[in-house]
Amino acid sequence: MNRYIPIALFVLLVALLAFGLTNDPKEVPSPFINKPAPEFSTSQLYSDEMISVAGMKGKVWVLNVFASWCVSCRAEHVLITELANKLTTPIVGLNYKDETTDAKQWLASFGNPYDMIAVDYKGSIGIDWGVYGVPETFIIDKKGLIRHKQIGPVTAQALNEIFFPLIEKLEKES
Protein backbone atom coordinates (compact mmCIF):
# COMPACT_ATOMS: atom_id res chain seq x y z
CA MET A 1 0.00 0.00 0.00
CA ASN A 2 2.75 2.49 0.95
CA ARG A 3 4.64 1.91 -2.30
CA TYR A 4 1.76 3.47 -4.30
CA ILE A 5 1.85 6.77 -2.37
CA PRO A 6 4.91 8.17 -4.24
CA ILE A 7 3.38 7.21 -7.58
CA ALA A 8 0.07 8.81 -6.66
CA LEU A 9 1.83 11.99 -5.52
CA PHE A 10 3.84 12.08 -8.75
CA VAL A 11 0.69 11.70 -10.87
CA LEU A 12 -1.04 14.44 -8.86
CA LEU A 13 1.97 16.76 -9.30
CA VAL A 14 2.05 16.14 -13.08
CA ALA A 15 -1.70 16.81 -13.30
CA LEU A 16 -1.38 20.10 -11.39
CA LEU A 17 1.57 21.18 -13.53
CA ALA A 18 -0.32 20.34 -16.74
CA PHE A 19 -3.34 22.31 -15.52
CA GLY A 20 -1.14 25.30 -14.59
CA LEU A 21 0.52 25.35 -18.00
CA THR A 22 -2.84 25.66 -19.75
CA ASN A 23 -3.66 28.95 -17.98
CA ASP A 24 -2.83 32.37 -19.42
CA PRO A 25 -0.50 34.17 -16.97
CA LYS A 26 -2.11 37.51 -17.89
CA GLU A 27 -5.44 36.22 -16.64
CA VAL A 28 -4.66 36.43 -12.94
CA PRO A 29 -7.97 36.80 -11.14
CA SER A 30 -8.17 40.01 -9.16
CA PRO A 31 -9.85 40.08 -5.77
CA PHE A 32 -10.65 43.76 -6.47
CA ILE A 33 -13.16 43.17 -9.30
CA ASN A 34 -16.58 44.54 -8.27
CA LYS A 35 -15.08 45.82 -5.02
CA PRO A 36 -14.51 49.47 -4.04
CA ALA A 37 -11.36 51.00 -5.48
CA PRO A 38 -8.76 51.45 -2.74
CA GLU A 39 -8.65 55.05 -1.60
CA PHE A 40 -5.63 57.21 -2.19
CA SER A 41 -4.92 60.90 -2.02
CA THR A 42 -1.67 62.08 -3.56
CA SER A 43 -0.15 64.97 -5.43
CA GLN A 44 -0.28 65.31 -9.19
CA LEU A 45 2.73 65.27 -11.48
CA TYR A 46 2.14 68.70 -13.03
CA SER A 47 0.45 70.58 -10.19
CA ASP A 48 0.26 70.90 -6.44
CA GLU A 49 -3.38 69.82 -6.50
CA MET A 50 -4.25 66.56 -4.82
CA ILE A 51 -6.02 63.73 -6.59
CA SER A 52 -8.10 61.12 -4.81
CA VAL A 53 -10.41 58.24 -5.54
CA ALA A 54 -13.14 60.02 -3.57
CA GLY A 55 -12.86 62.96 -5.98
CA MET A 56 -13.64 60.63 -8.90
CA LYS A 57 -16.92 59.26 -7.49
CA GLY A 58 -19.84 59.72 -9.83
CA LYS A 59 -17.62 59.28 -12.90
CA VAL A 60 -16.54 56.29 -14.92
CA TRP A 61 -12.77 56.54 -15.15
CA VAL A 62 -9.67 54.62 -16.15
CA LEU A 63 -6.52 54.28 -14.06
CA ASN A 64 -3.40 53.43 -16.06
CA VAL A 65 -0.32 52.51 -14.02
CA PHE A 66 2.84 53.43 -15.93
CA ALA A 67 6.50 54.38 -15.49
CA SER A 68 9.18 55.92 -17.69
CA TRP A 69 11.45 52.93 -17.10
CA CYS A 70 8.79 50.47 -18.30
CA VAL A 71 9.36 49.18 -21.84
CA SER A 72 5.85 47.69 -22.08
CA CYS A 73 4.37 51.06 -21.08
CA ARG A 74 5.95 52.57 -24.17
CA ALA A 75 4.39 49.84 -26.32
CA GLU A 76 0.88 50.40 -24.93
CA HIS A 77 1.11 54.22 -24.84
CA VAL A 78 -0.27 54.57 -28.38
CA LEU A 79 -3.37 52.62 -27.33
CA ILE A 80 -3.84 54.61 -24.12
CA THR A 81 -3.67 57.73 -26.29
CA GLU A 82 -6.28 56.22 -28.64
CA LEU A 83 -8.50 55.46 -25.64
CA ALA A 84 -8.17 59.06 -24.45
CA ASN A 85 -8.90 60.47 -27.91
CA LYS A 86 -12.03 58.37 -28.49
CA LEU A 87 -13.67 58.80 -25.09
CA THR A 88 -14.64 61.61 -22.78
CA THR A 89 -14.03 59.28 -19.83
CA PRO A 90 -11.23 60.64 -17.62
CA ILE A 91 -7.94 58.77 -17.94
CA VAL A 92 -5.86 59.01 -14.79
CA GLY A 93 -2.22 58.03 -14.96
CA LEU A 94 -0.51 56.61 -11.90
CA ASN A 95 3.20 57.25 -12.26
CA TYR A 96 4.65 54.27 -10.39
CA LYS A 97 8.03 54.30 -8.61
CA ASP A 98 9.42 56.92 -10.95
CA GLU A 99 11.43 60.12 -10.76
CA THR A 100 9.45 63.27 -11.53
CA THR A 101 11.94 64.53 -14.13
CA ASP A 102 12.04 61.14 -15.88
CA ALA A 103 8.24 60.92 -16.00
CA LYS A 104 7.88 64.46 -17.38
CA GLN A 105 10.57 63.84 -20.00
CA TRP A 106 8.93 60.55 -21.03
CA LEU A 107 5.52 62.23 -21.41
CA ALA A 108 7.09 65.13 -23.35
CA SER A 109 8.60 62.59 -25.77
CA PHE A 110 5.58 60.31 -26.23
CA GLY A 111 2.64 62.59 -25.47
CA ASN A 112 0.40 62.97 -22.47
CA PRO A 113 -2.99 61.25 -22.86
CA TYR A 114 -3.89 61.67 -19.19
CA ASP A 115 -6.41 64.06 -17.69
CA MET A 116 -4.53 63.83 -14.39
CA ILE A 117 -1.39 62.07 -13.26
CA ALA A 118 -1.08 60.84 -9.69
CA VAL A 119 2.40 60.16 -8.36
CA ASP A 120 3.30 57.02 -6.45
CA TYR A 121 6.98 57.47 -5.64
CA LYS A 122 7.21 54.62 -3.13
CA GLY A 123 4.77 52.23 -4.81
CA SER A 124 2.39 52.14 -1.84
CA ILE A 125 -0.67 53.09 -3.93
CA GLY A 126 0.19 50.34 -6.40
CA ILE A 127 0.45 47.84 -3.58
CA ASP A 128 -2.98 48.88 -2.25
CA TRP A 129 -4.43 48.39 -5.74
CA GLY A 130 -2.84 44.93 -6.12
CA VAL A 131 -0.47 45.98 -8.89
CA TYR A 132 1.81 43.11 -9.93
CA GLY A 133 3.90 45.26 -12.24
CA VAL A 134 3.57 47.94 -14.85
CA PRO A 135 1.64 48.54 -16.95
CA GLU A 136 -1.73 47.71 -15.47
CA THR A 137 -5.01 49.39 -16.27
CA PHE A 138 -8.25 49.52 -14.30
CA ILE A 139 -11.78 50.58 -15.25
CA ILE A 140 -13.73 52.08 -12.34
CA ASP A 141 -17.48 52.72 -12.42
CA LYS A 142 -19.52 55.68 -11.10
CA LYS A 143 -19.94 54.01 -7.70
CA GLY A 144 -16.18 53.63 -7.32
CA LEU A 145 -16.13 49.88 -8.00
CA ILE A 146 -13.31 48.32 -10.01
CA ARG A 147 -14.98 46.65 -12.98
CA HIS A 148 -11.95 45.49 -14.97
CA LYS A 149 -8.23 45.01 -14.48
CA GLN A 150 -5.84 44.61 -17.39
CA ILE A 151 -2.54 43.06 -16.36
CA GLY A 152 0.21 43.96 -18.77
CA PRO A 153 -0.07 46.21 -21.79
CA VAL A 154 -3.45 47.09 -23.21
CA THR A 155 -3.79 45.51 -26.65
CA ALA A 156 -5.86 46.66 -29.62
CA GLN A 157 -8.04 43.59 -29.11
CA ALA A 158 -8.62 44.42 -25.42
CA LEU A 159 -9.37 48.03 -26.33
CA ASN A 160 -12.01 47.04 -28.88
CA GLU A 161 -13.48 43.99 -27.15
CA ILE A 162 -13.32 45.02 -23.49
CA PHE A 163 -12.50 48.67 -22.84
CA PHE A 164 -14.77 50.50 -25.31
CA PRO A 165 -17.86 48.28 -24.76
CA LEU A 166 -17.49 48.17 -20.96
CA ILE A 167 -16.91 51.91 -20.60
CA GLU A 168 -19.86 52.65 -22.90
CA LYS A 169 -22.07 50.34 -20.81
CA LEU A 170 -20.91 51.86 -17.51
CA GLU A 171 -21.44 55.41 -18.80
CA LYS A 172 -25.10 54.57 -19.51
CA GLU A 173 -25.70 53.19 -16.02
CA SER A 174 -27.01 55.59 -13.40
Image: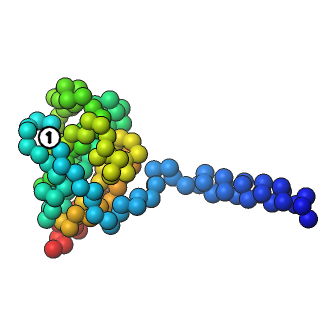
Q: Is residue 161 above or below residue 99?
A: below
- Which quadrant of the view contains residue 170? bottom left
**Nearest to the observer: residue 38 or residue 65:** 38
Q: What residue type is labelled 1?
A: Gln
How many labels were placed on the picture?
1
Residue 173 in the image, given as x and y percentages of width and height: 19, 72
Residue 74 in the image, given as x and y percentages of width and height: 30, 34
Q: Is residue 113 visible?
A: no
**Nearest to the observer: residue 97 or residue 25:** 97
- Which quadrant of the view contains residue 30? bottom left
Left or right: residue 111 compared with residue 22: left
Seen at 32% across and 29% down, the residue is 69
Disc 1 is placed on an element classified as: loop
Seen at 32% across and 65% down, the residue is 35
Residue 82 in the image, given as x and y percentages of width and height: 21, 46
Q: Can residue 64 be seen in this view?
A: yes
Seen at 25% across and 40% down, the residue is 120
Residue ID for mark 1: 44
Q: Quadrant of the N terminus?
A: bottom right
Q: Is residue 162 above or below residue 122?
A: below
Q: Residue furthest bottom?
A: 174
Q: In which quarter of the image is the C terminus?
A: bottom left
**Nearest to the observer: residue 49 or residue 76:** 49
Seen at 20% across and 29% down, the residue is 100
Left or right: residue 156 compared with residue 61: right
